[in-house]
Image (cartoon, rainbow, N blue to C red):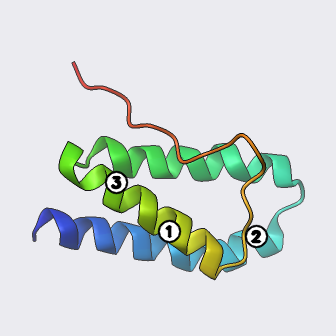
Amino acid sequence: MSSRERIDRELERLQSMLPPWREKLRDEAQFWPQFDALVARILDRTVDADRGFVRRRVERMLAQEGVVRPPAQEVPPARRRR
């Protein structure tokens, strides 16, 4: 499986989780740290050349699902590997 195929699968799985997850959400403040942690895990396994692609897909995913990120928050940067 290519890197892009793996990324697509992970992002599709994340997007499919959004509706039931948001439906059961008690506090909006809990959503973003959890969501961002999942996105960061994807970014951590993504080569530099594909990180912009992931960030654009995440923003498009949120827009398609009608999820609005609070001001001053953005897709988290990938943690640097040593």
Q: Is residue 50 above or below residue 16?
A: above
Q: Is residue 62 above or below residue 30?
A: below
Q: Position of residue 45 (x, y in %)?
A: 26, 46
Horizontal side of residue 16 vs 3, given as left or right: right
Amino acid type of disc 2?
A: Arg
| Residue depicted at x 60% and y 46% | 74
| Residue depicted at x 54% and y 44% | 37
The residue that label 1 is drawn on is 14
**What is the crowding at mark 2: few (fewer than 14 residues within 10 Å), some, or many (at least 20)?**
some
Compare marks 2 and 1 and give the one earlier in the sequence.
1
**Distance (Cα) linking label 3 and label 2:** 25 Å
The one of 61 and 44 positioned closer to us in this rendering: 61
**Distance (Cα) linking label 3 and label 1:** 17 Å
Q: Position of residue 75 (x, y in %)?
A: 54, 48
Q: Position of residue 72 (x, y in %)?
A: 72, 40
The residue that label 3 is drawn on is 52
The one of 43 and 20 positioned closer to us in this rendering: 43
**Distance (Cα) linking label 2 and label 1:** 12 Å
- Quarter-of-image position of residue 12: bottom left
| Residue depicted at x 76% and y 70% | 22
Compare marks 3 and 1 and give the one earlier in the sequence.
1
| Residue depicted at x 32% and y 41% | 44
Compare marks 3 and 2 and give the one earlier in the sequence.
2
Query: Which label belongs to residue 22?
Result: 2
Q: Is residue 20 visible?
A: yes
Horizontal side of residue 35 vs 46, given as left or right: right
**What is the crowding at mark 3: few (fewer than 14 residues within 10 Å), some, or many (at least 20)?**
few
Horizontal side of residue 82 vs 60, given as left or right: left
Q: Quadrant of the C terminus?
A: top left
